[in-house]
Image (tube, grey):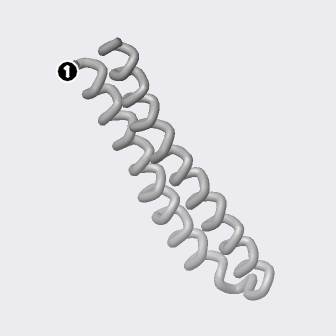
Amino acid sequence: MESLLTILAAAIAVALPCMGAGLAIGRAVASAMDTLARQPEADSKVTKNLLLGCALAEATAIYGFVIALLIILLK
C-alpha cells in the first residue's frame, strides 16, 4: 500500500506542473500570435519575450519531475 501511495504522489507531482506548463505555454503562444497579427513590426521583441516566458513555464514542469523523482527515490 505504501508503494501505491508513493507512486500516486509522484504522479500527482508530475501531472499538475506539466498541465500548468502546457496551459501557460499554449496561452503565451496564442497571445504572441495575436500580437504579431496586429503588429508585425514587433516581431523581435515578442519572440524574445515569448521564448523567455516559455522557458520559465517549462522550468516548472522540470521542477515537478525532479520532485517526483525525489519522492520515488527517497521513499
Q: Quarter of the image containing the C terminus?
A: top left
Closer-to-camera residue (38/59):
59
Q: Quadrant of residue 4?
A: top left
- Residue 54 drawn above or below residue 68: below
Amino acid found under the numbered disc labelled 1: Leu
- 40 left or right, relative to 32: right
In the rendered image, the residue lying farthest to the left is 74
Q: Residue at x 65, y 84 (%)?
A: 42
Q: Position of residue 18 (x, y in %)?
A: 51, 44
Left/right of residue 7 with respect to residue 23 in the rendered view: left
- Residue 48 vertical placement versus 17 (above, below): below
Q: Is residue 15 left or right of residue 26?
A: left
Quadrant containing the N terminus in the rendered view: top left
Q: How many marks?
A: 1
- In the rendering, at what x and y percent does residue 50 appear? 56, 67
Give the quadrant of residue 29. Answer: bottom right
In percent of width and height, residue 51 lies at 53, 62
Dot 1 alpha-carbon crowd within 10 angstroms: few under 14, some 14 to 19, many 20 or more: few
The residue lying at 32 percent from left, 34 percent from top is: 66
The secondary structure type at the circle numbered 1 is loop
Which residue is depicted at the point 73% across and 87% down?
39
- Going 30% across and 20% down the picture, which residue do you hit? 72
Name the foreground residue: 27 vs 29: 27
Q: Which residue is mark 1?
A: 74
Question: Does 7 sit above or below residue 41?
Answer: above
The furthest residue to the right: 37
